[in-house]
Image (spheres, rainbow, N blue to C red):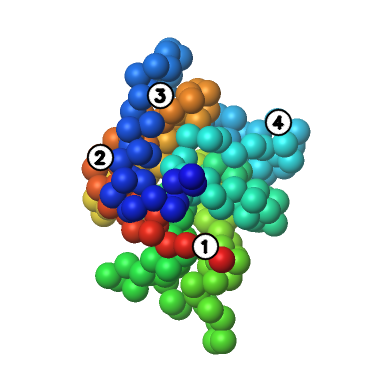
Amino acid sequence: MPLLWLPVWLALAVSVASLAWMAHRTKSPSSQPQQRALSALQAPSGGGQPGRQVASAALSAIFTPQVLRWKPQILRWSRVHALDPNLIAVVMQIESCGDPTAVSPAGALGLFQVMPYHFEEGEDPLDPDTNARRGLAYLARSLDLSQGDAGLALAGYNGGHGVIGRAVSSWPQETRRYMAWGTAILSDIQQGKAVSPALLRWLEAGGAGLCARAAAVRLP
């Protein structure tokens, strides 16, 4: 039975338990600095702008089921916006855990938690393709402004493009945490881990509630 059809509390428990069991059984590679581990994302082979997706980029399986159910769309969006699909999935994971109906207290909307002023009149902010188009255009610009640095691009997505040129000490705490979670998950992917310890910590720190709400949403 698909995990999405289970009761919300049971679906969440199974997701977390499965990830924890795999982490226990999986031998992790030697730890490396995150900057080094992210080098493949920031400077892909084959030319093109730093941090941009290579044609053969694949989506990691470490993400939660609520995000992985968007895999076809993530791969399509990655081609349209020339972004690594794992960077897209990290943003979706942290922002909404794959809930297209998510609305934050600050008014951010949809899969990528895009603020209303980014949409044009007549657009549906909760339509996944529309939400991705606006959110990922902002992410792509953030990556360009950061010269392909994935961590700075994540900070720019959360805190606004203006933070990219400022000292980290001046950033809001939320933006620092956002960059830390995102780069840690990307580092686990770059190291080839079958399970992301960073993602497990994110779930334990409060992400589990976000994913529980996402699990309750049936997709068309």
Q: Residue 190: x and y, percent?
A: 52, 28
* Disc 4 secondary structure class: loop
Q: First in sequence: mark 2 or mark 1? A: 2
Depth-wise, is mark 2 or mark 1 nearer the camera? Answer: 1
* Disc 1 secondary structure class: loop
| Residue 188: quadrant of the picture | top left
Q: First in sequence: mark 4 or mark 1? A: 4
At 54% from the left edge and 72% from the top edge, which residue is drawn?
Answer: 127
Q: Which amino acid type is shown beneath numbered disc 4?
A: Ser
Q: Is residue 75 visible?
A: yes
Q: First in sequence: mark 2 or mark 3? A: 3
At 39% from the left edge and 50% from the top edge, which residue is drawn?
Answer: 6
Position of 20 with respect to 47 (left or right) is left
> Label 1, on which residue?
219
Mark 2 → mark 1, Cα distance in angstroms: 25 Å
Q: Nearer the viewer, residue 210 or 172?
A: 210
Instruction: Tally the marks.
Output: 4
Quarter holding the C terminus is: bottom right
The dot on residue 162 is none
Mark 4 → mark 3, Cα distance in angstroms: 31 Å
Q: Residue 91: x and y, percent?
A: 46, 51
Mark 2 and mark 3 residues within 8 Å of each other at the beta carbon? no
Q: First in sequence: mark 4 or mark 2? A: 4
| Image height of 4 relative to 51, above or below | below
Mark 1 neighbour class, 10 Å CA radius: few under 14, some 14 to 19, many 20 or more: few
Q: Is residue 160 visible?
A: no
Q: Which amino acid type is shown beneath numbered disc 1?
A: Leu
At 66% from the left edge and 33% from the top edge, which residue is drawn?
Answer: 44
Depth-wise, is mark 4 or mark 2 nearer the camera? Answer: 2
Mark 4 and mark 3 residues within 8 Å of each other at the beta carbon? no
Mark 4 → mark 1, Cα distance in angstroms: 36 Å
The dot on residue 22 is 3
